[in-house]
Every structure is written in structure tokens, then in C-alpha cells.
Amino acid sequence: MPTPFEDLQSRAAARWEELTAGQSAWIRVGGGTSGLAVGADRVFDAFNHAVESSGVNASVSMVGALGLMYMEPQVDVLMPDGTRIYYGNVEPEEAISIVEQHVKNGEPLLDRAFAYSVSDGAASGETGVGKLPVLESLPMFALQERIATRNFGEIDPHDLLQYVANDGYTALNRALTEMTPEQIVDEIKAAGLRGRGGAAFPAGLKWSFLAPSDAPVKYVLCNAEEGDPGAFNDKGIIESDPHTLVEGLIINGYATRSSHGFIFIRQGHEMSIDAARKAIDQTYEAGLLGKNILGTEFSFEMEVSLTGDSYVAGEETALMEAIEGKRATPRFKPPFPAAEGLWKKPTNINNVKTLAYVPEIVRNGSEWFKGIGTETTSGTAIVCLSGHIKYPGMYEIPMGMTIRDVLEKVGGGVSEGEQIKVLQAGGPLNGLLGEEAFDTIIDFDAMTAAGASIGSGGIIVGNETTNIVDLLRTLIAFNQFESCGKCFPCRLGNTHMLEILDRMCQNKAKSSDLALLQRVGSSMKAGSLCGHGQLGYNPILSAMKYFGDEIKSSLDGELELVGVFGDGTMILPSRTRP
């Protein structure tokens, strides 16, 4: 008699064969926020209408975004012979011609396609698609190592069976039937998985803080607040493959012997909220959540929790305050969450990306994951490229690739005749990088040494027209607006820094203002309760390292630096406090 999971796999295999190995074509329209922003929903409706009106035998699905945001809306057509053609920037009115000519007559519109791929047995030469580049040969694909994003553009995020057909929940089944909680924690430790929310703390070590507690109620939380400008990978994972997050959180619960899980999403991110809730409902229906999961003794509950538009709600203790229905402000520590967290129960908090890696680590083993990346930072980085870049999008690249390769080979660089001047990497609390830092490898330690951070994965690119002082003012204005105001070093410090930068932008600043900026920033770092204030001076500090001359040119006189400490702190001349 088959086990509950074997029965689920059987139904999933039948569903996948129906879509990919039958006699009908499968048309996939890329969704997600990036696709819908440029009309993917209208394209999806147009293809459904075109299939119905033409009488062809085809299925139409809205799948997750492929990651090539500059090509949205994207449509790909998988024919019964295994040939798959990718079309970019598709308009609704093109649906009829693609269905009639490609699906019905077997003649792809090669002048509108940007790539193709084939499965075993496909005869690409007969259809002429060999004239197109293979998708996997495109630089933005060839240089990726897709782990957390492995199902992007491949499956309907709202179809549990499609996820299971692509090895989904295999890791959970293995964890519950073949491994002890201690073994899973050891596996995550051995894999070298570090938190992808910005702090880069070892995930397995964090889990080991919670696991020994014998409290009957323990919580594991997923932080999907993602308020960083320029970062959209957490939302991308939930929108395109929510079950990989749900599976990772269940395994996290089992490994730490927890009873409940929460996925914490900022209110207003409706697509992510809807995808997460549907995935949780489907998982309950399949017996993968609730009492005695897959017939084992492990029981686990999960739900989605929302907060208002608060950037500080992404701080772990503020997040817990929000779930409890309070104002999202940081707590004093200790006690730390593993001892006293949500509703004063032992708690762990992990980022979406961190949990999305867990199923593949459990399925493939720690050595496999450890073999990707660098010695100190294993695995991949999911980077979001935006700004003055030719190919904006979301790309999963192995740790160890240089920033320059990501910008030029993956992102395509900037327009011809222009140069990249500055990067704002890792969110508004992290630094600005100049061209001399572009050969830095992407890993947590190397990026920190360069004066920035991987952070949440956002990389905003600025060309030579970017004014550094104005960019700094924008970042500090965001930080000032988003300060929760609980502690005065952050509340007042951000306000004072913004006032100074306003003067600099208006050419009304004095040379002494630069020294004042440093004093305010140092006070914020020493006296703020959480990272919002502690890190608030970082953008200015790194900008002085790479763009000091430009910043000083906005002052009313030269301010000579006496020197720079090893951590990058400026040594300024002694001046009378203004």
C-alpha cells in the first residue's frame, strides 16, 4: 500500500505528464508583480480567448516570473514535441497570431522570440528554432545557479501538484521519515547556510538556540516584510514558488521541535499574501500541515500575519510586536527571542531566502550546498538589479562572482557610451560603492570589507549622471521617515543628518557640516536600540570613501581629512561645534 506521500507524488506525476508530455501545447504566461505591472493579466486573458476561439488543444497557465524583468510580459509555448519557445514584451493583441501560427500550424514566430529550449526528443532543426539562442546559453542564465529560484517560470505557483512533480516536499518527507531533528540542524550547520536577511548569521546555529527548549509551544517565523528599496526577491519567491518557502518553514519547525509557524508579510503586498495563503491551504488539504503530518507524530500549524507599512517591522523583535497586534517597535535585548520571543514563548526568525534553500539542502545534502559559493559564504545570492542597468531583473548567482561580472555579464552594463558610477547595495542602511570596488567578490565578508553589504539583495545602479549628495539625501530621507521613533539617537539623528544634506543639496552647507555628520552618525551607532539607527550613518561613511571629493565640493570650503581609521571612520580636523 502506498504511503500518503507516494500517493501525492503519483497524482502530481499524472498532472505534470498531462501538461508536458501529452498531445496538447502548454502556454505559460509569466506573472508576478513585474509581469502584472506591464499587463501580464491582460496577456493571460488574451491567450485563453485565442485558444478558445481557434479551437486548438492547449493549456494556458499563469506561472511565476522567470526573473528577466526587462522582457515582461513573457510567454513561452511548450509544444508536444518538446520544443519550448520564449517570447518577450508580448502584447495582448499578439495572442491570436502566436496561437494560430505557432500552436496550430507549428510555425514559431522567430522574429518575436528571444530564446528556445528543448527536451529529449525535440527536433529543433525541423522548426527552425535553432536560429534562436538556447535560453540556458544567454549570459543572464548561463551564469546563474538556480536553487531557491529553480521553479521560477516553470510552474503555476497556485498548483501544489506541479510543485510536488518537481521534487517538492521530497525533502520534508525525507526529514520526517529518515532524519531526527538534531540531524537536520547539523545538516544546516554543515551546509554553511548563513541568513539571507542581511545579518548573515549562521542559520543552523540560530536553530540550535531554539531546538533544546522543551517548551510545549514554540514559534518559527518567516520575515517577508522586505521594505528595502530595490529589493524584491522575497516577494518574488512567494509569488513564483510559495511552496518552497512553506516546505522550508515546516522543516524548520520540525528541526527545532516547534509547534507553530508564521509567515510575516507587509500589508499591501497582495500578490504575496494571496500566494502564501493559498499554498498553506493546499498544504493542509494534502496532509502536509496540521496534525500528524504524512502519518508521523509531528504536528505543525502555520498562518500568514500582516503588518502595516513599517520598515522597522522587519527588525526581528519589532516583527514579533506587530504579530502580537502592537506597534512595530524594537524590544530591548536580552531576553533574546530563542528564550522569550513571540507571546513570550521561545522563537526563531528567518528570512524568506534562508528558508527557501532548506528543502534543497535536506534533499541534496550539505556537501552539495557547501560546494557552491566561497569558503566563508556557501550557496548563492539572489540579486535584484535595477536603476541604470540594461537588463533589470532578479538573478540567482553563485557566491564568489565579482560585482563587475554581475553588472556587465548578467545585467548587460549600461547604455553604450555611459559608465556605471555608483551602486547602492544591500538596502538604505548599507553603503554606496564606487567603480574601484566593482572587482569585489559577492560574499558577506568581502562586501562588508568594501563598505557595503549584500543585505537583502537589492543593487541599484547609478550612471555618471547620478549626483552622490542627492542620492545620499534620498536614502537618509527614507531612513528618517521610516524611523519608529522609539529611541532618540535614531529619531533625532536621522532628522539632523537630513537637515545637513538638505543644506548640501542647496549649496548652503559649511565645511564644518561634514564633521557634524560624523558626530551625529557616531552617536546613532553607539546609542540606537536597533540596526535602523546603528547602521543609519553607513551610506554617508561609504560615500566619503568612494566619492569624498564630490561630497566636499558641495561645501563652502575644502575640508582636509587628517586620516581614516581601519574601519573606515574619518579622522577630521578639530572644529568648534556650530
Image (cartoon, rainbow, N blue to C red):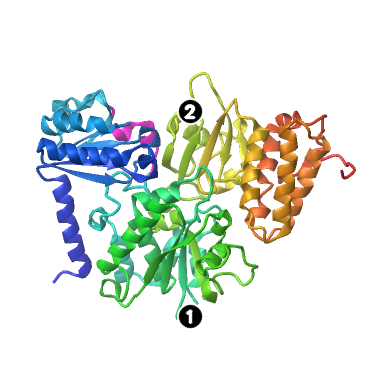
The boundaries of the magenta stretch are 133-145
Q: Report x, y in % for residue 426.
A: 56, 45
x and y percentages locating residue 517 in the rendered image: 76, 44
Disc 2 marks which residue? 413
Q: Secondary structure at mark 1?
A: loop
Residue under pointer 1? 215
**Horizontal relation, residue 492 to residue 448: left or right:** right
Nearest the viewer among 39 and 115 is 39
Pick out the residue farthest to the right. Answer: 576
User: Alpha carbon of mark 1 to alpha carbon of mark 2: how far?
Assistant: 53 Å
Which element carries disc 2, helix, strand or loop? loop
Say whether residue 178 is left or right of residue 381.
left
Q: Is residue 134 magenta?
A: yes
- Front residue of 538/371: it is 538
The quadrant in which residue 570 appears is: top right
**What percent of the width, then of the height, locates residue 84?**
21, 36
- Give above or below for 330 relative to 381: below
Q: Earlier in the sequence, mark 1 or mark 2?
A: 1
In the rendered view, tell whether residue 331 sits above or below residue 449.
Answer: below
Say which quadrant the C terminus sits in: top right
Q: Is residue 336 magenta?
A: no
* Residue occupying image coordinates x 30% and y 52%: 157
- Residue 281 at what x, y percent from top left? 30, 64
The kind of residue on which mark 1 rests is Ala
Residue neighbourhood size for the residue with mark 2, other residues' Cα within 10 Å, grouped as few (<14), some (14–19), many (≥20): many
Q: In which quadrant will I find the N terminus?
A: bottom left
Can residue 318 be seen here? The reply is yes
* Side (left or right) of 54 relative to 98: left
Residue 525 visible? The answer is no
Q: Around disc 1, counting alpha carbons within 10 Å, would you say few (fewer than 14), some (14 to 19), or many (20 or more)?
A: some
